[in-house]
Structures are given as C-alpha cells and as structure tokens.
C-alpha cells in the first residue's frame, strides 16, 4: 500500500510500535525515504492521533495473522477489535479525515461450515456468522473487528468500551445494538472495508514470518515433498499488489462504498498451488509437493464483480502471483534449499 501511494505522489505516514526496532523499521526507511514514521500501538488508546493530524485519508491494515498462538484472545482478537476501535476513535478526534479504508478479510465473509449449496458464490452481502474462537481464532477476530467497525460507524457507540471481543459474539447482538441507538457522535469520514482472501505475491521486505511466505518457502524447501501438501485447506488467493491497488482506489474514488471482496474466483488448495508453481521450469526444479495428505472437502467460489466494476481492477491469475512470489523469495536468498 505504501509503495502504491508513494508512486502516485502522496505524502505518506505510517506507524510502528517502536521506531528503534531496526528489524521492522529499517527496510521501510530504506525503500521509502519520504515515509514519515510515528510510534503507535493498537492497544494503546489515542496513540494514532498524532500520526493522523493533518491527514485526509486513513488506511488501517494492521491486524495479527498467525496460525499458531497460545492465547488467541490476547494475540489475535484484542489487537484486531480494540485496534480497529482505537483507529476509528483517533480519526474522529482529528479534523479533516474524509475516508477510512479498513483491511478486513474474506474470513469475515465465508462461514466456517460449508454451505448446503456448494455452488454458492460468496460476495459482500455475506457474513461469517458461525465461526467461534475455538474453530479458527483468526477468522473470529476478523469478523468481530469488521462488525465492530460498521456498528461504530452506524451508531457511533465510541463512548463505550465493549471489552475484549468488542462485546459482539454474534450477528443478533449487532442488530440489537443498532436498534438500541445510543450516544451519537458526528464523524467527518466514511468507511470502506477491503476483504482479501489468502494474500500471495512478492513481499516488500525479506521477513519470513508471514503465513503466505512460510507456506511458499516451505514448499520450495521440500518440507511437504514426502509428507504431502495439506489438501484440506482450500481458500481463495489474491496478489498483494492487487490488494494494495484496491485499497488505494477505494480511498480515491468518491463513488466507492461498503465492502469489497478481493479474491480469485475459486478456492485453491495447497497441492494446486504447488502445481501452479511447478508450471514454471525454474521453480519446477525444487522439491515441491506432488501429493496431498488429505482430500479437499469443499472448494469455495467467489463473486468479485463489485470490486472489478466499482474500482476497475483486473486481478492477476493465482499462478502468476505464486511464480512471482517464489522467484522473489529465491532472488532475496530466503530459500535455503537449492533447486
């Protein structure tokens, strides 16, 4: 997103938890010399206000995405929900903000259990209403965070602290809060949410702790060559460059509104990802998985006509994104195994 904004000539600010953390800040300063960095924390109320002063737009992308956590409430739910509320409240206290663009997720759209109609195409009108924290803490955190954001915008209940999960455990509670009304605060901005599926494509930096980087890195390094890929995981995928473009266009276009699902038209499992990588002669030399250790029970379908029509985006094919990503990781010497 920073790269896209800088390329268009915007003056861009960003936040990090610590300006002294060179491992997380150094590459940003090196790649984007004009970027202004401020310290802020999702869980520290009011900490974004200084950064927002004098800005016209806010793009909130920060939310933890990791599969292995010991305390899902503290590590995933709290930063996602409370962080989103913190950003919105800080934006309200600053004059001149016209629009907030929030990174949500396709996880806030697709339900945890497959639909009765397996040919259903998920779209922006759908909500993930059945995922519990015990099912998938990340998906749970994303749906709660986006729901809380829309409720805040609709009724401005920002004078209350709804607690760890925003106080909302299901859609019925959301409806009850909306009907109840409450203390109203005027805001100068509208809200748009971007709901990407699994994000792939070449990363900006060389960190290897992102879930998609870990997956492709593991494939190239032969981690799944003998044991097989996880065939049971089948979700949509989308290029990080397309996700960034969607954020910027949603920010710029006055006609943009509501939610935008950004994804491939069909889900892809890990074995399919491996076969798409193997279609490239250079990458095919690596020990990619050739079998799956379990079967795919459900392949979701996605309707992305809204983002294509409203924002004019042409989404890259998943195979192109995966190959570009793999070659980028190889070029950055992030792959330990040799072809």
Image: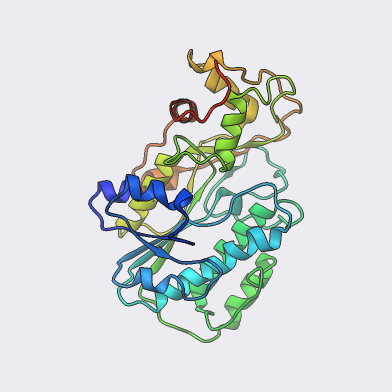
Pick the front one: 152 or 180? 152
Question: Which residue is at the front of the view, 30 or 274?
Answer: 30
Quarter of the image holding residue 162? bottom right
In the rendered view of the protein, which quadrant contains the C terminus? top right
Image point (36%, 45%), residue name: 245
Identify the residue shown where x is 51% and y is 16%: 279
**Residue 198 occupies quadrant:** top right
40 left or right, relative to 147? left
**Quadrant assignment, res 121:** top right
Residue 1 visible in the picture: no
> Is 205 situated left or right of 219 in this image?
left
| Residue at (30, 67) in percent of width and height | 55
Q: Residue at x 44, y 30 (%)?
A: 332
**Towards the viewer: 339 or 150:** 339
Identify whether 268 is placed above or below 97: above
Q: Is the residue 226 above or below the residue 74 in the image?
A: above
Colouring chosen for the image of the structure:
rainbow
Residue 143 appears in the figure: yes
Q: Residue furthest left?
A: 9
**Total number of numbered labels?**
0
Query: Where does the image place residue 321, in percent across and percent down from the top left?
Result: 46, 31
- Expressed as whole percent of the image width and height from the top left, the position of residue 139 reads 64, 53
Q: Position of residue 265 (x, y in %)?
A: 52, 36
Query: Where's residue 133, x and y in %?
Result: 73, 57
């Amino acid at each position: 997103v920073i790269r896209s904004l800088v390329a268009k000539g915007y003056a861009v600010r960003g936040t990090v938890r610590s300006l002294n953390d060179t491992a997380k800040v150094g590459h940003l300063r090196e790649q984007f010399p004009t970027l202004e960095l401020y310290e802020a924390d999702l869980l520290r109320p009011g900490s974004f206000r200084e950064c927002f002063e004098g800005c016209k737009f806010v793009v909130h992308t920060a939310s933890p995405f990791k599969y292995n956590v010991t305390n899902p409430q503290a590590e995933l739910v709290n930063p996602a929900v409370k962080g989103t509320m913190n950003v919105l409240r800080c934006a309200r206290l600053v004059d001149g903000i016209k629009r907030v663009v929030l990174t949500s997720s396709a996880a806030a759209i697709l339900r945890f259990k497959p639909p009765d109609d397996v040919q259903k195409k998920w779209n922006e009108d759908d909500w993930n209403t059945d995922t519990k924290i015990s099912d998938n803490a990340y998906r749970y955190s994303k749906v709660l965070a986006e729901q809380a954001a829309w409720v805040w915008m609709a009724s401005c209940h920002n004078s209350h602290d709804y607690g760890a999960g925003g106080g909302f455990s299901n859609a019925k509670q959301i409806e009850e809060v909306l009907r109840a009304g409450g203390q109203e605060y005027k805001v100068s901005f509208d809200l748009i949410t971007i709901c990407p599926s699994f994000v792939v494509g070449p990363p900006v930096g060389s960190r290897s702790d992102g879930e998609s980087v870990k997956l492709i890195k593991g494939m190239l390094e032969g981690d799944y060559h003998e044991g097989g890929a996880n065939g049971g995981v089948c979700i949509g995928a989308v290029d990080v460059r397309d996700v960034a473009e969607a954020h910027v266009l949603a920010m710029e276009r006055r006609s943009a509104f509501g939610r935008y699902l950004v994804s491939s038209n069909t889900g892809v499992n890990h074995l399919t990802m491996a076969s798409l990588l193997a279609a490239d002669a250079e990458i095919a030399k690596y020990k990619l998985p050739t079998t799956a250790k379990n079967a795919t029970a459900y392949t979701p379908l996605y309707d992305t006509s809204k983002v294509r029509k409203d924002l004019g985006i042409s989404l890259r094919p998943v195979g192109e994104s995966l190959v570009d990503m793999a070659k980028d990781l190889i070029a950055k010497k992030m792959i330990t195994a040799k072809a």
